Amino acid sequence: MPTQDLRAAEYALGTLDAEERSALEREAALDPGTAGRIRAWECRLAPLMAAVPPVTPPPRVREALLRALPDASGGGRDQLRHLRRQVRRWQVAAAGSGLLAAGLALFVAVGLPRSPAGGRYFAVVQAGGALPALVVRVDTRTGLAQVRPVGADAPAGRSLELWYVGADGAKPLGLVGAAPSQVRLPQGTAPDGVIAVSVEPPGGSPSGQPTGPVIYTGKLIAD
């Protein structure tokens, strides 16, 4: 991934420090290309908000925002624009925990091979808003999926198995290892499906269907 795109992605995720963020905002004010890259990443990551459970912020957050509200002066309007940009980034990056953003930042930083345009989806596979276990990138045109483990943890003496769950039920995709892998998608893979991970005996399910608890899930989102 080009350095400029990576910086824009990290800005949208909220992982830049204050100095780096301010420098990029100054650059975006002068360079339409930088501003466009930031907007593109904010739009691309916005659907992830739907995958994170809502969390009511503590009262101190509201109090801090009220104290930060600007007056009607020109400087206040500049502060208001900055605050709105901050809110948009918080909506994408934090959405209650910040852990999802951390996992996605790792994914953006290391990258996965990108497939041709069209038919591309990805899923952040996790348990209830916790740190992502896997990031799965699906290409329905090639029939392949790229799987990158982030925080998947198999119980002792057990295996983790990856599944595509669609209208026809669960179909196995393979075991989850410690290293990135590529798996072939089953016929009939549709963008409204779900990627799931179950705990299975060593070597995987003996029946071709999940036999143990499903501990991670993630909905496919257009890439």
Image (cartoon, rainbow, N blue to C red):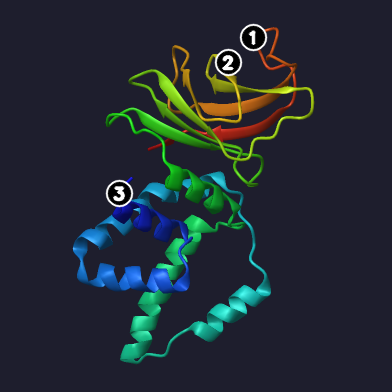
Q: Secondary structure at mark 3?
A: loop
Residue 65, numbered circle: none
Q: Nearer the viewer, mark 2 or mark 3?
A: 3
Q: Amino acid at mark 2?
A: Pro
Q: Secondary structure at mark 1?
A: loop
Q: To which residue does mark 3 refer?
A: 2
Residue 208, numbered circle: 1
Q: Amino acid at mark 3?
A: Pro
Decide which of tag 2 and tag 3 comes sooner along the chain: 3
Q: Amino acid at mark 1?
A: Gly
Q: At x 50% / y 83%, what residue is drawn?
A: 68
Q: Is residue 99 left or right of residue 142?
A: right
Image label count: 3
Q: CA distance from mark 3 to mark 1?
A: 41 Å
What percent of the width, then of the height, locates residue 160?
67, 24
How many other residues sit within 10 Å of disc 1, few (<14), some (14-19) or many (≥20)?
few
Considering every residue shown, the one lying at the far top of the view is 207
Between 50 and 37, which is closer to the camera in this rendering? 37
Residues under numbered marks 3 and 1 in contact, where contact means CB atoms less than 8 Å apart: no
Q: CA distance from mark 2 to mark 3?
A: 35 Å
Residue 172, numbered circle: 2
- Splitting the image into 4 quarters, where does residue 187 fall? top left
| Vertical position of residue 223 compared to residue 65: above or below | above
- Splitting the image into 4 quarters, where does residue 11 fall? bottom left
Residues under numbered marks 1 and 2 in contact, where contact means CB atoms less than 8 Å apart: yes
